[in-house]
């Protein structure tokens, strides 16, 4: 099993934008050529305060929570996104709700 990672931004670009709106999307569309379909959750997202780096144990706990309860504000996926808490609704980073790759 690969170590879980959580990268909300890639080189200053929101993760969803990098994954689905950059050159990366062409590779993502071909993922079935290289990877088997995962049965269990292999990615989990959650909001963390700026400057905090989550540990592998925290990521594993969040992934277990996602598998047990489904998406919640404490552990979610890009398909079931929860906005960043504490921001006015018009400023929340919810761009993970748009776009996608089949």
Image (cartoon, rainbow, N blue to C red):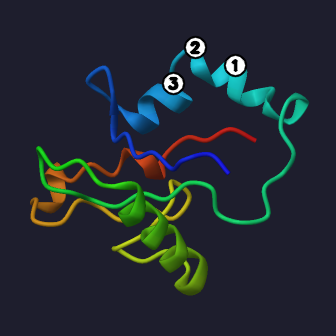
Gap between marks 2 and 1, in whole Å? Answer: 6 Å
Comparing labels 2 and 3, the label whose residue is closer to the camera: 2
Give yes or no for contact between labels 3 and 1 (Cβ–Cβ under 8 Å). Answer: no
Q: Position of residue 23 (x, y in %)?
A: 58, 13
Q: What residue lies at 40% left-to-right and 36% top-to-bottom? A: 15
- In the orientation shown, which residue stands out farthest toward the bottom? 69
Q: What residue lies at 69% left-to-right and 29% top-to-bottom? A: 28
Gap between marks 3 and 1, in whole Å? Answer: 10 Å
Classify 83 as above or below 8: below
Q: Where is residue 85 in the image (x, y as percent from the top left)?
A: 18, 66
Which residue is disc 2 drawn over?
23
Classify 61 as above or below 14: below
Q: Quadrant of residue 18?
A: top left
Q: What residue lies at 46% left-to-right and 52% top-to-bottom? A: 97
- In the orientation shown, which residue stands out farthest toward the top? 23
Gap between marks 2 and 3, in whole Å? Answer: 7 Å
Q: Which residue is nearer to you in this view: 94 or 9?
A: 9
Which residue is disc 3 drawn over?
21
Give yes or no for contact between labels 2 and 1 (Cβ–Cβ under 8 Å). Answer: yes
Q: Quadrant of residue 59?
A: bottom left
Side of 38 where 66 appears, left or right:
left
Which residue is disc 1 drawn over?
26
């Amino acid at each position: 099993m690969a170590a879980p990672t959580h990268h909300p931004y890639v080189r200053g670009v929101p993760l969803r934008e990098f994954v689905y709106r950059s050159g990366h999307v062409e590779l993502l569309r071909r993922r079935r050529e290289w990877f088997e379909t995962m049965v269990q959750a292999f990615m989990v997202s959650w909001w963390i305060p700026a400057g905090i780096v989550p540990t592998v144990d925290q990521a594993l706990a969040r992934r277990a929570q996602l598998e047990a309860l489904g998406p919640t504000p404490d552990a979610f996926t890009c398909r079931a996104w929860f906005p960043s808490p504490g921001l006015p609704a018009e400023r929340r980073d919810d761009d993970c709700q748009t776009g996608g790759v089949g």
